[in-house]
Image (cartoon, rainbow, N blue to C red):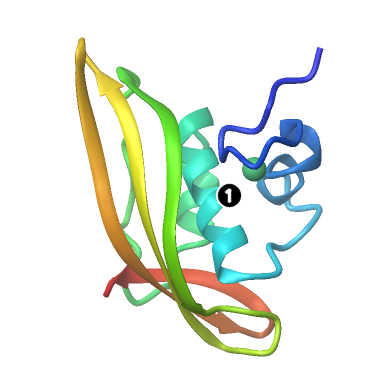
Amino acid sequence: MSTPCPCGLGDPYEHCCGPFHEGRKKPPTAEALMRSRYSAFAVGDEDYLLATWHPTTRPASLELDPEQRWNRLEVLGRTGGTLFQTTGTVEFRAHCRVRGGRDVLHENSRFVREDGVWLYVSPV
Ligand SMILES: [Zn+2]
C-alpha cells in the first residue's frame, strides 16, 4: 500500500518526506531538508524545490526532466546543520537513469536556517 520514501531512509513516503512536501512539517536538520529535496526531485514536486531554495540563489522557475528517474541517494558526509545551528553542508551522490543511460549528481550543498526554516543555498 505505502511506498517507501525515495530518500532511502526506509520509512513510507507519507511518514518521511511526504509531510514536508505537503507543508505539514518542516525538516529539522539540513540533512532532512536535503533528503526531502531529493525526494521532491523523485516525485516531481517543483513547488517544493523552489520553496526550499534560498531567495538569493533560487531560479525563477524549474523544469524537471520527466525522463529522469531518480533511483538512489547516498549521503556521504555532513557538517553542522543540526537543530542548534544555522548553517550546514551535506555531501551526497544522487543516482538517476535518463533515456536508458545512468547519471550521477555529486554535490556538496550549503544550507542555512532562517527563522527556524532550513533552505538550500548552493553548492559549496
Ligand atoms: Zn524521505
How crowded is the residue under tag 1: few (<14 C-alpha within 10 Å), some, or many (20+)? many
- Residue at disc 1, CB closer than 8 Å to ligand 1: yes
- Image quadrant, ligand 1: top right
Q: Residue at x 29, y 21 (%)?
A: 97
Residue 1 vertical position relative to residue 64 in the rendered view, above or below: above
Q: Residue at x 61, y 89 (%)?
A: 85
The part of the image, by quadrant, that contains residue 60 is: bottom left
Q: Nearer the viewer, residue 116 or 51?
A: 116
Q: Position of residue 32 (x, y in %)?
A: 62, 59
Residue 68 vertical position relative to residue 92 in the rendered view, above or below: above
Q: Is residue 77 in sight in this rendering?
A: yes
Q: Residue at x 30, y 17 (%)?
A: 67
Q: Position of residue 9 (x, y in %)?
A: 65, 42
Q: Nearer the viewer, residue 101 or 43?
A: 101
Q: Nearer the viewer, residue 108 or 74?
A: 74
Q: Mark 1: which secondary structure?
A: helix
With 49 as the anchor, is 92 left or right in this view?
left
Q: Position of residue 68 (x, y in %)?
A: 31, 24
Residue 90 vertical position relative to residue 74 in the rendered view, above or below: below
Q: Determine which residue is flagged by label 1.
A: 36
With 85 as the anchor, is 109 left or right in this view?
left
**Quarter of the figure that contains the N terminus:** top right
The part of the image, by quadrant, that contains residue 94 is: top left
Q: Amino acid at mark 1?
A: Ser
Q: Is residue 64 in sight in this rendering?
A: no
Q: Nearer the viewer, residue 115 or 18?
A: 18
